[in-house]
Amino acid sequence: MNRGTTHHGTPLSPAAPGTARRVTARLRRTAAGTVARLAGGRSGSRDTTAAPTGRDTTPAPTARGTAAVLALALLATACSGGNGGNGGNGGDRPDEHGTEYKAGTLRVLASSELADMGPILDEAAKATGVTVRPTYVGTLDAVERIASGEADKGYDAVWLSSNDYLRLRPDTAKRITDETPIMTSPVALGVRAATVARLGWNPAKVTWSQLHRAVADGKLTYGMTDPKRSNSGFSALVSVASGLSGAQSALTEQDVARATPRLKEFFTGQKLTSGSSGWLATAYARRTDVDALVNYESVLLSAPEKLTVIRPSDGVVTADYPFTLLTSARPEAKEAADRLTTYLRTPDAQGRITGTTLRRPVVAGVRPASALARDQRRELPFPGSRAVADGLLDAYDNTLRRPSRTVYVLDTSGSMDGERLDRLKSALAELTGDFRDREEVTLMPFGSSVKQSEVRTHTVDPASPKAALDAIRADSRRLSASGGTAVYSSLQEAYRFLGRAPSDSFTSVVLMTDGENTDGDPASAFDAFYGSLPAEQRRTPVFPILFGDSDRGELDHIAGLTGGKLFDATRGSLDGAFEEIRGYQ
């Protein structure tokens, strides 16, 4: 597949076709979700799929424009959408939930990790009279709401981990103003104490090159969030690319090309991927074969298991959490934001922030929490252009990281006939735009049992991806509804299928069902089967999708048993749920 100019196997063209097909699929999904929301119907409640990476009023992007959008997808923070906080604001500008603007309350698009600021914001409300009502969204969602102008209709400010990516887009720069950093947290590695001792490291002196060498020698494994959906994942990707390239200024294509051979080696050590930091930490706790986590320092220090936090001595990428006004905000909102940020930067508030969240204060003279090391680190350079950011992500997805391997266990029982089956076919067709090079995709439809004659496996060939994607779409169109619902027997068959040909890949099972188990083995039989699997196979999670009349309790049990996560399509779109799972594959 022609991805434009390639240096040492790293695609750096802003017109990368793989990039274009994935973002174009998201644009279509998002536009549909927006129409549904405006019509009063269901919309995606998730942070990445429902993200307005395009709007129904926006023309289809060019390849270059599409690549620019994906450069920002590097930073999507996986989290659950929805409003938090209390209070309401009054006026004449309803937000997406129908609440009107009121003086004294700031409506804020915020990164999910900022939920830990709740107690401090409650104190701020008492001190300033300003209540923050956050809507937790993914970073890409926030960026696109700002760029499209949608954020202007229902929000006053945005509060993300970083605004660096916003500055890559001229269409967002004119819509934001008054950026006020509130706290900082660098990307770091949390390493199990036994691993640090085994490697003989002095945590204060470890470099990115040492980390790379340990991985390349098979002595270090780690988990990291998906750079397309999580800002911590993107920051980690930029950190390692900058650290291994020796870049002294804004990261360039040449820097990435120089680092590519070692980047490939470094990502052989990634054994866990995730769309959210929370799930990553939970998955890590189940895995004795994974040595470390890559995330923000504050997240690592808050982990249930005590980890040795390593900030590489040759530099880090740091989140500064700027509270940022939208230029469309009313004068009274701007005044309220000024009161809020002034309070949050007082020594007392800064002390509470660092003590509560384990982030670092930004005001001179305020001592960081005692758990935070005091030695300084150089700030590693951020990509200098959207083309570089897009190329770095495209390289990660299609060249650097381990490939994905997924079995889609799809309910095509009689109850799926009609609209539900149509929605499934449409969701699968859209999802093909998101499959990566080298990815193995198996469709396993079931009714009263697995429909063996319809099971198909396709691998996306980097040299000719269209063949596999077209075949997956064709297989999806041929799905038909019949029979009962054999959930547990079909899951067993998926595990047997994967066990026949183990591979070094990010392996998972996605289960979509619209009803309760009526045929085949009961839950107890699946539990016993799963418990009898080899340890390596028990590391394959099941990601169930709640849809139609499916039983939440059953699906929660499956997710909990296998180390997966339940995704809810009853409060959003089915294609949105499928796409959100992509961050975990």
Image (cartoon, grey):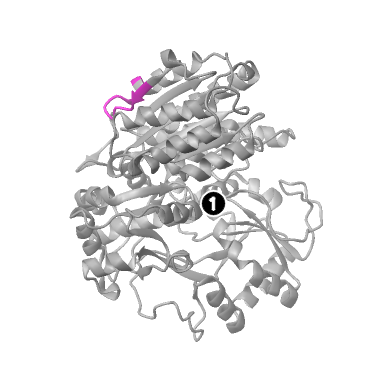
Q: How many marks?
A: 1
Q: Is residue 499 above or below residue 167?
A: above
Q: Nearer the viewer, residue 552 or 371?
A: 552
Q: Nearer the viewer, residue 120 or 482?
A: 482
Can residue 301 be seen from the camera position used here? yes
Can residue 58 be seen from the camera position used here? no
In the rendered view of the protein, which quadrant contains the N terminus?
Answer: top left
Residue 212 locus on image (x, y percent): 23, 58
Was residue 461 drawn as part of the magenta stretch in this picture?
yes
Q: Which residue is the extreme one toward the bottom?
A: 365
Three-letter code, disc 1: Thr
Taking the spot 48% from the left edge, 21% from the top edge, the residue there is 445
Residue 555 locus on image (x, y percent): 57, 37
**Left or right, 517 with reference to 395:** right
Was residue 520 drawn as part of the magenta stretch in this picture?
no
Q: Nearer the viewer, residue 63 or 537?
A: 537
Query: How packed is label 1: few (under 14 Cα within 10 Å), some, or many (20 or more)?
Result: some
* Residue identifier under label 1: 172
Classify mark 1: helix, strand or loop: helix
Taking the spot 25% from the left edge, 70% from the top edge, the residue there is 197
Q: Is residue 24 above or below residue 421?
A: below
Q: Which residue is the extreme one toward the right?
A: 91
**Left or right, 28 with reference to 273:** right
Q: Nearer the viewer, residue 385 or 409?
A: 409
**Left or right, 103 with reference to 498:** right
Residue range in magenta is 457-467
In the rendered view of the protein, which quadrant contains the C terminus?
Answer: top left
Q: Is residue 300 above or below residue 425?
A: below
Residue 509 locus on image (x, y percent): 44, 34
Taking the spot 22% from the left edge, 40% from the top edge, the residue there is 9
